[in-house]
Image (cartoon, grey):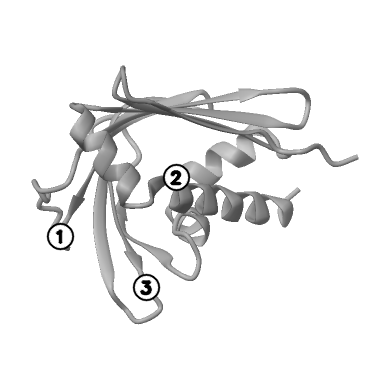
Amino acid sequence: MKKTALLDFVVDRQNEKITVKRSFDAPLDLVWTAWTEADILDQWWAPKPWRAETKSLDLREGGRWHYCMVSPAGERHWCFFDFKSINPKASFSGQDAFCDENAVADDSKPIVKWLNQFSRLDGRSTLVDIELTFDNLEGLEKIIEMGFKEGFTMGLNNLEEYLKTKV
């Protein structure tokens, strides 16, 4: 019997953070791989009808994922994620920023620090617990205004659809 996926999205303005918890009816190994391999990230990261396109992914502490989200009209929004720590199949942390095609950060948009933790819920399901922290409330509010909740939720739903094809 299929379980209902957990989605918990909490905005904590007082502590300048967003917490997202999402369960997937898929094994931890598969969920981890979907978050750490460029060809798979490109299939689910962007909210439809947009798509993600990885320019480079160096999955190591000190490495970087440089990618863009591409609109149906070809408009590109570039970002990078710098990996700070990686504990395979358990967690990774780092920070992301909007940037240009050459990975020069856009100082007009907030930098977000991420901590993604992966854990088994049972023999088959996986929980991804994500904490996003901001340098200030203004940065948190800007991300919310940009539609982060809606876009990220759509991306996580894309991931759920991708995982259904692999289990």
Residue drawn at 52 percent across, 57 percent down: 44
* Quadrant housing residue 115: top left
Q: Nearer the viewer, mark 2 or mark 3?
A: 2
Q: Nearer the viewer, mark 1 or mark 2?
A: 2
Q: Amino acid at mark 2?
A: Lys
- Where residue 139 appears, as percent x and y from the top left, is 21, 36
Q: Can you identify the residue that label 1 sits on? A: 100
Q: Can you identify the residue that label 3 sits on? A: 71
The reply to whether dot 1 and dot 2 touch (C-beta < 8 Å) is: no
Q: Can you identify the residue that label 2 sits on? A: 149
Q: Earlier in the sequence, mark 1 or mark 2?
A: 1
**Is 151 or 99 nearer to us in this picture?**
151
Q: Nearer the viewer, mark 3 or mark 1?
A: 3
| Marks 1/2: CA–CA distance | 23 Å
Residue drawn at 63 percent across, 41 percent down: 30
| Marks 2/3: CA–CA distance | 18 Å
